[in-house]
Image (cartoon, rainbow, N blue to C red):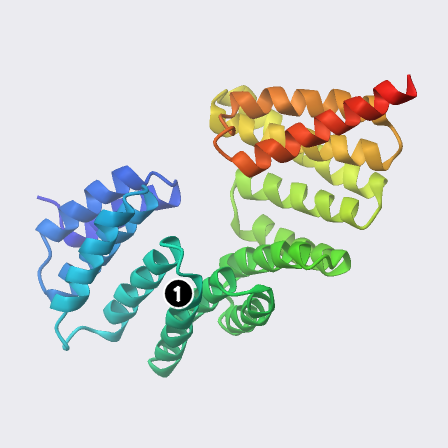
Amino acid sequence: MTTFEDEWAAASAQMGQREYGRAREHFAAALEVAADDDEVFSARALLARMDSATKQLGDARVAMDAALAEAPETLKPRVVARLRQVEAIITREEGQREEATQKFIALYDFCMQNELFDAAIDAAHHVAIAGDLQQQVAWAKKGIAAAEAGDQRSWLAVLWNNLGVTYEELNQPADVLEAYEKARVYHYETGGPVQKLAADWAVGRAWRLNGDAAEAQRHIEVSLEAARARYAEDPTPASAEWIAYGLQELGRTAQLAGEPEMALKLLEEARAKWTEAELESWTEGTQELDTELAELRAELAKDA
């Protein structure tokens, strides 16, 4: 018979690979062998989280409301934080963005008061996700400061990357580049092959947003080479995804460089990989790529 710690470790490993259904099985097994209230409610929290991660949001809400109602006052602060974190995530996924933001802010304060610094970083990260753009910047910087103080280098990769995304939305390309370059440093220190190629892609994208086609192309080609090598070893939709992103960004870079024919060729290749990667369910991204293609074809037809 496995122990709670064994099942928890197995579930965490599956979460790291985004295999949420399998992770749920291990959390359910952990609940079966839980020895005390802290273990019981930790497992219940993560079971609800796996339900939300697998789009069973109604089940997640029911499970979380029950856990919160039944949680004893004697739980350790870390378990309380875990319950409150999952409840806030579910609230955000239900579309209640402002309420979720307030829950994460309260969670951050609770974690700081109880010296749960890693959980405080996570809460700040979630405020940055759930808040408006200015809140995202402010809380990303809070999270970065806390992560730097605790030397949480894997968190620094995520936090700098998300800050770069926010700066993209704010149309601040110089800040985008700085954030993605810092994220790349930490991704290369702590991440795997996918994180590294994604980091190179992001830096290339940032150079394009800053109007430098040569630097953009250099970084994107590094990312694309790694993505193609990964695909050669494992030709699945998941490994085709970053080839699609790389070709799309390279096509945009060719447009920036004044090479519309090359841009069209690359974007058409990107669209084929898009289908192979099963990305059509991402409606917004698919529409954006199809619009780019239509506009470029119209421009070339007009000049013919």
Q: Residue at x 62, y 58 (%)?
A: 166
Left or right of 178 in this view: 119: left
Q: Quadrant of residue 242?
A: top right
Mark 1: secondary structure: helix
Q: Looking at the picture, how far across and down is residue 175, in whole percent?
A: 72, 61
**Residue 224, above or below 261:** below
Q: Residue furthest right?
A: 303
Q: Quadrant of the N terminus?
A: top left
- Neighbour tally class for label 1: few under 14, some 14-19, many 20 plus, Cα within 10 Å: many
Left or right of 274 in this view: 39: left
Q: Which residue is mark 1?
A: 100
Q: Quadrant of the C terminus?
A: top right
Q: Residue at x 31, y 60 (%)?
A: 86
Taking depth in this image into account, of 153 and 237 the one nearest to the observer is: 237
**Residue 232, above or below 70:** above
Q: Looking at the picture, how far across and down is residue 267, in whole percent?
A: 71, 25
Looking at the rendered structure, the kind of residue marked 1 is Ala
Residue 211 appears in the rendering: yes
**Residue 21, above or below 241:** below
Q: Total number of numbered labels?
A: 1
Q: Looking at the picture, how far across and down is residue 11, in whole percent?
A: 27, 46
Q: Looking at the picture, how far across and down is residue 250, in whole percent?
A: 74, 32
